[in-house]
Image (spheres, rainbow, N blue to C red):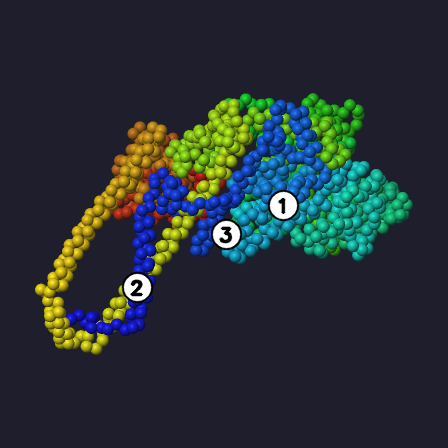
């Protein structure tokens, strides 16, 4: 009798077995049911999704759950450790654009300046100040705050309210109403979609609203980049990194907003045309991380109008900061700086009508706002105190007055006045003003007076004292005032950039792209136009030229490049005006001025004579009809007469080195920091660059930056000269329409296409609208697929009406196919596609959601299956343990007892269950029948299973071959031939290990020829083989590039025989000269990078290695492996690494590093240092 059956289970053991039984039975049924479900799924050959077992569209629609009401949709994929939003978009079923309203000038019936001006005027009087001209926004200054009704609550809100921003978020440009938010959204969406730098160029005349428009643009970009779902916990960051990034983004956003207020205070002023005119150019760059957040930025400034510090035209003010200081400074600061009312300072009045306030502006409140913003961006209260102390210095510098006198040698010199001017009760003497300035600057009064009264010239080895007369001394004071204010402004710019530029590791890792906002002074025509106006109008000419190049020239060139039928349109080109001002080849105005300044001939009449002599025949230069320092330039924006009286003073920096060195002796560290000179002694001896040279360099750098960005234009228009709200002067409007080139732009847009996109991007966005292109396309090229998509019957249905898409037709659905892009003629056609896409997206969302739910269920089933296996394993272990313990019980191994028990059991069973007993007979028969039935069913199941597996393998093979046949059938003849070669398995041996290296597409179908130089016709090579005793059978011959120990690349010929590798120098192929021969037995291994480059390293035992650049590296490595395997009976080692160590000289290891860069084309190399070469591999 079996000993195990003599064991009587305990109660604890029974309870444990019952628990396992109750758990395992349900798990078993679940696993079996799931296994049946999984086996029933099938994957059709035409469509695949990474996380789905079955992806047939009909299965999707049948098995995924539907969403009854959709207001927004988002698919969120969850995992054990993270959640990632795969797709999210608002659902707007009624978001199509209303093209009936004339919000886009492309819809005008007639194309001329009058029609454009009339339409703009009719919209302006209805408070519609924004209008589109294709992708260009036209903005007319309303001179007041505008409001609109909120659709839901009928409440009046600002036109720039947050709810208005929300309506533009993620909205396509052609579906948006004209607004700066639409341009900002277009730039923001482009940087997220296409990963390219963007620029917003806001141009127009002074007073046209450029500064306010730039604020609205920056407001939208910064708000949207922080408000969107980018700050959620779904980002792949740790909690610490996420908190650090959030803090960084909020800090940068506050700093950028604060910078606007600060820069306006120190860089803006009231002019005749504009109460808040920018007197400097500003290019603000917002840098984005890969999540679309503004995390850094910087500001470039151009040509601060320094002359305004000491002189303003009648009816104008100095910079706002002076008036804010005088109105808002505390009593203690007033006492410390001895501040007087604004009317008492010469630099704020200039003996003109005193304009010290602006209607509707409280300078004291603005002062406090500026101080708070400076504190917010990280400027300390001590630095702010010193900053305004320097402004007080500038104010008091204008009060220093001199009187003419003579020295002992009767030479004219300057003397400080001792009596105050009695024209104003607060006026002080020149001596008192000098004392105040010296105290505020931290310089001794005698030292400051000497710095202003004379200078020291070094002639040979002797120093000579040159006295200044009263006029020259006052000029030095003005120069010091201008320089001090410019350095204050530059210091502010540097601190602002330090605040928005961070050195966080997250910042360096997350750099993506940027959006630049250009707010620069507009075209200016004053009663007296000086050097600053020439510079301002010059940069506007350059921007106008850039606008024409980026809109008209580029668009027309694109049509011709794409092979579309297009007739080039001529337009007014202002390049000649730019050349007149800047080109040294034709003695432009700036080069002639620099030449006169260099030879120290500072005569206004001589300068105007040279201008007239050089340019009197120029079509855009007009000589003055009266004698005097005047000339006229015909700009694109109108005729401007310039006065050269102040050209020399504005162009030459008169801040002598004595003044500069003297300011560095100040006891105030802030003053020393402002006047810190980092130039070398040699550079100090050179003539400093003129203002025009510095400005031209800055403008060229700006144009280069803008030319490398995708542009978005906002053209601002000034409605009237009186700054009256919602009133427009027709003549002024017509003039600006002509000057801004809106007519030419409209002509090109109307004759051209409103939308263009590369085929791949177009299909990526709209392919699921047609069954011909979704879920998979059977077309060979994207162009054919695009044509099939637009040829679908239901694709042109829009709002119940049919808009048929026809190629090169004169209909609303007209489109043209270029070489690489699809072009749509009318915006209605694009709107129809967008509406259909919006309607189709919920269905796609349902498909993704259903598939994801099934995927999650499979994960749950897998967990249950693993639990079932674990419990079963534990049950078997416990059972085995119990059986083992039963065997160890006393008497379990007593053979006599076991035999006795077995005998007793046999006797009892023979009596009770005799073989002749009916029950025993029936039981034996049923058991025999069950065994037979089970055996039969097992055999049948095994046979059917084998047959099914054979059929399944055959079906998979047939499907693969049929798909390959279908694809090859549509290929051109050369590609079909290449496919046949590939099917023969010519490269099968090499591909076993070459699968570790990326291949260029153009090398996949290359035939292996062996001889690439024609050795049969070159008998001179036979002598090389004979001298070495090598076999003359050449298996490989090609022209290669050898890299020496200095990483110099040299042209060579590489020959491979059955025994040697020959490195041959041949300036002429027919005249070879052997440089080196290497036995194949000495080659230890071959090294290559995993990238698609042509570099290969042959490591040689005991000798210098060979670093080659071989086009036929695939064939070469295969030949070397075959020869080593057949001749030397070993396997040649082939390694792949991003960094390869190579001994090009014995006992000296060099490094060759490889880097993958998707932003470049082809392969380039650079020498990092003496021991390393960097190979950059771009797109093939």
Give yes or no for contact between labels 2 and 1 (Cβ–Cβ under 8 Å). no
Which numbered disc flags the more N-terminal residue, 2 or 3?
Answer: 2
| Nearer mark to the viewer, of 1 and 3 | 1
x, y percentage for residue 1087?
A: 36, 46
x, y percentage for residue 122?
A: 68, 30
Assign the C terminus to one quadrant of the image.
Answer: top left
Mark 2 closeness class: few <14, some 14–19, many ≥20 residues within 10 Å: some
Q: Which mark is residue 21?
A: 2
Left or right side of 186 for 1052: left
- Gap between marks 1 and 3 measured at Cα: 25 Å
The reply to whether residue 1109 is visible in this rendering is: no
Left or right side of 133 for 896: left
Which numbered disc flags the more N-terminal residue, 2 or 1?
Answer: 2
Residue located 52% across and 47% down the image: 290
Q: Residue furthest bottom?
A: 890
Q: The residue tagged with tag 2: helix, strand or loop?
A: helix
Q: The residue tagged with tag 1: helix, strand or loop?
A: helix
The reply to whether residue 685 is visible in this rendering is: yes
- Gap between marks 2 and 3 measured at Cα: 42 Å
Q: The residue tagged with tag 3: helix, strand or loop?
A: loop
| Nearer mark to the viewer, of 2 and 1 | 2
- Gap between marks 2 and 1 measured at Cα: 63 Å
x, y percentage for residue 512?
A: 53, 45
Residue located 68% across and 53% down the image: 375
Residue toward you, 738 or 934: 934
| Nearer mark to the viewer, of 2 and 3 | 2
Q: Which mark is residue 234?
A: 3
Which numbered disc flags the more N-terminal residue, 1 or 3?
Answer: 1
Residue 3 figure quarter: bottom left
x, y percentage for residue 684?
A: 68, 44
Q: Which mark is residue 445?
A: none
Please give the residue where the numbered disc 1 appears in the rendered image: 162
């Amino acid at each position: 009798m079996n000993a195990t059956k003599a064991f009587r289970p305990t109660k604890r053991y029974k309870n444990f077995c019952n628990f396992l039984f109750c758990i395992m039975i349900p798990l078993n049924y679940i696993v079996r049911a799931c296994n049946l479900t999984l086996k029933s799924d099938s994957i059709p050959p035409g469509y695949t999704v990474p996380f789905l077992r079955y992806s047939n569209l009909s299965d999707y629609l049948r098995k995924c759950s539907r969403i009854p009401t959709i207001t927004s949709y988002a698919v969120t994929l969850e995992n054990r450790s993270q959640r990632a939003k795969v797709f999210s978009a608002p659902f707007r079923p009624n978001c199509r654009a209303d093209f009936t309203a004339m919000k886009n000038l492309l819809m005008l019936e007639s194309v001329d300046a009058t029609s454009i001006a009339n339409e703009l005027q009719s919209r302006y009087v209805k408070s519609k100040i924004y209008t589109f001209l294709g992708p260009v926004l036209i903005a007319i200054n309303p001179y007041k705050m505008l409001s609109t009704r909120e659709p839901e609550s009928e409440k009046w809100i600002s036109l720039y309210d947050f709810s208005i921003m929300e309506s533009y978020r993620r909205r396509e440009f052609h579906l948006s109403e004209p607004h700066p938010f639409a341009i900002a959204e277009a730039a923001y969406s482009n940087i997220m979609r296409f990963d390219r730098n963007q620029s917003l160029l806001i141009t127009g005349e002074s007073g046209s609203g450029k500064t306010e428009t730039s604020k609205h643009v920056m407001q939208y970009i910064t708000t949207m980049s922080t408000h969107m779902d980018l700050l959620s916990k779904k980002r792949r960051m740790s909690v610490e990194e996420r908190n650090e990034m959030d803090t960084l983004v909020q800090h940068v956003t506050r700093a950028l907003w604060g910078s606007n207020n600060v820069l306006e205070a120190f860089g803006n002023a009231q002019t005749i045309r504009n109460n808040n005119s920018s007197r400097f150019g500003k290019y603000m760059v917002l840098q984005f991380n890969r999540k679309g957040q503004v995390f850094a930025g910087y500001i470039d400034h151009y040509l601060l109008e320094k002359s305004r510090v000491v002189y303003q035209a009648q009816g104008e003010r100095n910079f706002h900061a002076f008036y804010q200081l005088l109105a808002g400074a505390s009593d203690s600061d007033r006492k410390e700086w001895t501040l007087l009312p604004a009317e008492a300072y010469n630099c704020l009045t200039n003996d003109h009508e005193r304009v010290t306030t602006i209607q509707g502006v409280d300078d004291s409140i603005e002062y406090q706002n500026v101080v708070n913003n400076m504190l917010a961006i990280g400027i300390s209260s001590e630095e702010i105190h010193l900053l305004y102390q320097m402004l007080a210095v500038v104010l008091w510098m204008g009060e220093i007055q001199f009187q003419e006198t003579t020295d002992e040698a009767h030479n004219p010199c300057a003397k400080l006045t001792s009596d105050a001017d009695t024209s104003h009760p607060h006026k002080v003497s020149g001596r008192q003003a000098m004392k105040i300035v010296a105290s505020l600057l931290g310089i001794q009064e005698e030292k400051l007076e000497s710095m202003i009264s004379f200078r020291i010239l070094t002639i040979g080895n002797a120093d000579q004292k040159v006295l200044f007369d009263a006029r020259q001394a006052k000029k030095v004071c003005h120069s010091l005032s201008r320089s001090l204010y410019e350095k204050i402004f530059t210091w502010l710019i540097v601190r602002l950039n330090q605040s928005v530029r961070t050195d966080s590791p997250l910042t360096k890792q997350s750099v993506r792209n940027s959006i630049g906002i250009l707010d620069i002074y507009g075209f200016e025509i004053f009663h007296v136009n000086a050097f600053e106006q020439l510079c301002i109008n010059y940069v506007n000419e350059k921007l106008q030229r850039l606008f024409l190049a980026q809109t008209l020239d580029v668009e027309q060139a694109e049509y011709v490049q794409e092979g579309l039928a297009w007739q080039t349109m001529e337009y007014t080109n202002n390049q000649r005006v730019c050349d007149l001002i800047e080109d040294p080849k034709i003695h432009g105005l700036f080069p002639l001025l620099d030449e006169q300044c260099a030879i120290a001939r500072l005569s206004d009449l001589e300068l105007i004579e040279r201008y007239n002599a050089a340019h009197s025949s120029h079509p855009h230069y007009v000589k003055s009809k009266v004698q005097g320092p005047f000339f006229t330039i015909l700009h694109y924006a109108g005729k401007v007469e310039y006065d050269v009286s102040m050209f020399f003073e504005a162009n030459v920096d008169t801040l002598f080195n004595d003044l500069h060195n003297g300011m560095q002796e100040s006891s105030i560290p802030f003053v020393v920091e402002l006047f810190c000179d980092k130039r070398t002694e040699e550079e100090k001896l050179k003539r400093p660059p003129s203002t025009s040279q510095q400005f031209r360099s800055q403008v060229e750098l700006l144009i280069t930056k803008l030319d490398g960005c995708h542009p978005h234009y906002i053209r601002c228009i000034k409605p009237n000269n009186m700054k009256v709200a919602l009133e427009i002067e027709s003549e002024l409007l017509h003039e600006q329409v002509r000057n801004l080139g809106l007519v030419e732009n409209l002509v090109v847009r109307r004759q051209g296409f409103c939308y263009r996109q590369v085929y791949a991007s177009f299909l990526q966005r709209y392919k699921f609208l047609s069954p011909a292109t979704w879920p998979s396309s059977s077309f060979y090229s994207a162009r054919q697929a695009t044509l099939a998509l637009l040829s679908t019957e239901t694709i042109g249905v829009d709002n119940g009406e049919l808009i048929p898409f026809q190629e090169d037709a004169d209909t609303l659905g007209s489109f043209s196919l270029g070489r690489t892009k699809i072009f749509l003629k009318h915006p209605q056609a694009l709107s129809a596609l967008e509406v259909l896409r919006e309607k189709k997206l919920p269905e796609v969302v349902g498909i993704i959601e259903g598939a994801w739910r099934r995927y999650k269920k499979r994960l749950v089933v897998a967990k249950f299956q693993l639990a079932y296996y674990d419990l079963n394993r534990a049950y078997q272990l416990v059972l085995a343990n119990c059986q083992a313990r039963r065997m160890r019980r006393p008497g379990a191994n007593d053979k006599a007892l076991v035999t006795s028990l077995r005998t007793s059991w046999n006797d009892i069973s023979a009596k009770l269950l005799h073989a002749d007993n009916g029950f025993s007979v029936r039981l034996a028969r049923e058991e025999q029948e069950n065994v037979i039935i089970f055996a039969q069913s097992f055999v049948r199941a095994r046979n059917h299973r084998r047959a099914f597996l054979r059929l399944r393998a055959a079906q998979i093979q047939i499907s693969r071959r049929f798909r390959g046949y279908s694809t090859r059938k549509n290929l051109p003849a050369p590609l079909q031939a290449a496919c046949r070669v590939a099917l023969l398995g010519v490269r099968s041996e090499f591909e076993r290990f070459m699968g570790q290296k990326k291949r260029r597409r153009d090398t996949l179908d290359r035939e292996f020829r062996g001889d690439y130089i024609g050795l049969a016709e070159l008998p001179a090579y036979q002598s090389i083989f004979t001298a070495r005793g090598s076999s003359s059978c050449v298996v490989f011959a090609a022209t290669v590039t050898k890299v020496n120990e200095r990483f110099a690349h040299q042209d060579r010929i590489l020959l491979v025989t059955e025994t040697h590798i020959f490195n041959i120098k041949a300036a002429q192929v027919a005249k070879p000269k052997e440089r080196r021969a290497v036995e194949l037995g000495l080659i230890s291994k071959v090294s290559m990078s995993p990238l698609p480059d042509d570099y290969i390293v042959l490591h040689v035992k005991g000798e210098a290695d060979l670093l080659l650049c071989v086009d036929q590296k695939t064939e070469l490595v295969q030949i070397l492996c075959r020869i080593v395997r057949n001749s030397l009976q070993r396997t040649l080692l082939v390694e792949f690494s991003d960094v390869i160590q190579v001994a090009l000289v014995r006992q000296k290891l060099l490094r060759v590093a490889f880097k993958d860069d998707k932003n470049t084309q082809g392969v380039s190399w650079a020498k990092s240092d003496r021991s390393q070469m960097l190979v950059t591999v771009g797109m093939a």
